[in-house]
Image (cartoon, grey):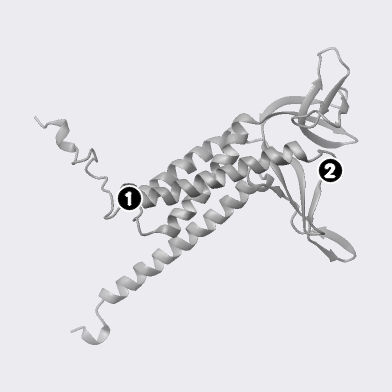
Amino acid sequence: MTDPTDSLEAGGIRKGFRLPPESAVCDLWSHLRLWSVAVAGLALDLWSKDWAFSKLDPGPDGGIEVLPHIMTFQRSLNTGALFGLGKGWTPVFIAASLLALGFVLFLFVQSSRHRWSLHLGLALVLAGAVGNLYDRAFAIADVVRYTKDGRTHTIEGMLIREQTNDEVVTIGSWPDKLHPQRIPRAWNLQLWQQGVVRDFVRMEPRIRIWGRSINIWPWVFNVADVLLVGGVGLLMLNFWWERRAEQAARRRVAPSPASSP
């Protein structure tokens, strides 16, 4: 009878799952690169969100113009994913974020300790994913959806007063309940709670087409979104570099046509 312990290699690594030579998971400096950048990015993201939602007025004129006609800091709640895409799919995004975190750690374990740019990209993705995952899990807002004049509107905020016998629902900004709005229940009103992501960076570059001014970047985002985009871009560059290195290695070992019999 085969001993089950025979299926384990030294160090508790199962056969069939071998660490690459000079694996990053066994290197102290690789861990320092990954976790220090990830923690710093996460801290910056959460601090900036707390600052925006405690210092900026939630009203339409409460933003701070950072770069005239280019960038403004203005509070916004996002029920979707990156740049507001896929609104209302919070459970799906939470599951996808957890899978992404597992994939990041898998890539780190499989990488060499010399791949510092890959580790930097993984750290940025890790920080951005955890930052937005934290919001979806702990920033819970009241969402009111209603129909007026044939158009559907959605407001994310915090209920000020809501009773089943009230004819209207009063909702203010999240989390300070400022600028209350009264929504009649007769407007086909729907009400639920949902995890949201705190955004506050609004880009405002505009172009004119046929006499109309069009905002070419209508999405509001946060530091976590920037970290995610930067990290994914760096990972794609690493995969491209690795692909080129593999192709060059195959060309070096391939026999030239002149040497063929």
* Residue that mark 1 sits on: 27
The picture quadrant where one finds residue 92 is top right
Which residue is depicted at the point 75% across and 41% down?
76
Which residue is depicted at the point 26% across and 84% down?
257
| Amino acid at pointer 1 | Asp
Badge 2 or badge 1: first in the primary sequence? 1
Location of the C terminus (image quadrant): bottom left
Q: Is residue 121 above or below residue 252?
A: above
* Residue that mark 2 sits on: 62
Q: Is residue 239 left or right of residue 189?
A: left
Q: Is residue 172 left or right of residue 30?
A: right
Which residue is depicted at the point 53% across and 40% down?
97
Which residue is depicted at the point 65% across and 31% down?
139
Q: Position of residue 15 (x, y in %)?
A: 21, 43
| Amino acid at pointer 2 | Gly
Question: Is residue 128 in view?
Answer: no
Q: Nearer the viewer, residue 91 or 134?
A: 134
